[in-house]
Image (cartoon, grey):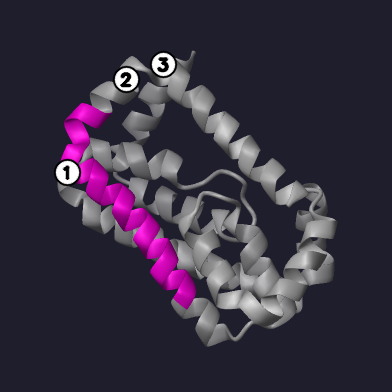
Amino acid sequence: MLRKLYDYVMDLADHPKALWILAIMSFTESSFFPIPPDVLLIPMVLAARTRAWRIAFVCSLSSLLGGLFGYAIGAYFFEAIGQPIVDFYTLQAQFERFQTLYNEWGAIIVGVAGFSPIPYKVFTIASGVTGLDLATFTITSAISRSARFFLVAWLLWKYGAPIREFIEKRLGLLTLLFCVFLVGAFVLLKYV
């Protein structure tokens, strides 16, 4: 079953509308969707290494726009939309601590969250709730998200064939590690 899912994603990565699907996934992940765009970015670059930079650009731009939407959720719709998202991830206590930290460390927090695989959407919403300067948020997000996605694209562009072989040989183990890492990021956010 895992192999069929992998083959499906690889086929999807080569689909004519794949860039649009990636853009939607990247946008929604930055504001409310739990699955990172890397699950499509990686196979898309592996399937078409010559388009790595275009793929990374679409992912980065869409993520930035999604981050601005997350900021708007926090700034204007927190009670209606943002609070249920925070409640869904059971991050109420941590969210209150984040609000306090934003007064002093907002740009650094957004930069780290934008580059790392931890749930970025929590930080986009928190930035809006706390009123982090929009220009600071936008510049920091653009730099950190682009750095992340272009680094992934560059690594896959440079070492694509060996990485693809490695992934295909160890698909089960890598899927398990990805799930553990994703759950670990949520647990870390919840208890830090």
The amino acid beneath tag 2 is Glu
Dot 2 or dot 1: first in sequence order is 1
Residue 180 x/y as whole percent = 59, 30
The reply to whether residue 4 is in sight is no
Label 3 CA crowd tier, 10 Å (few <14, some 14–19, many 20+): few
Residue 166 x/y as whole percent = 29, 23
Whole-Å distance between the Cαs marked 2 and 1? 18 Å
Q: Is mark 1 on a helix, strand or loop?
A: helix
Judging by the rendered image, the residue that carries numbered circle 3 is: 3
Chain part drawn in magenta? 140-163
Main SS of the magenta segment? helix
Whole-Å distance between the Cαs marked 1 and 3? 25 Å
Identified at 44% across, 39% down, the residue is: 39
Is residue 15 placed above or below 4 in the rendered structure?
below
Q: Residue 158 carries which label?
A: 1
The amino acid beneath tag 3 is Arg
- 131 or 98: nearer the eye? 98
The amino acid beneath tag 1 is Lys
In the image, is residue 162 part of the stretch drawn in magenta? yes
- 127 or 3: nearer the eye? 127
Q: Is mark 2 on a helix, strand or loop?
A: helix
Identified at 53% across, 23% down, the residue is: 176
Judging by the rendered image, the residue that carries numbered circle 2 is: 168
Dot 2 or dot 3: first in sequence order is 3
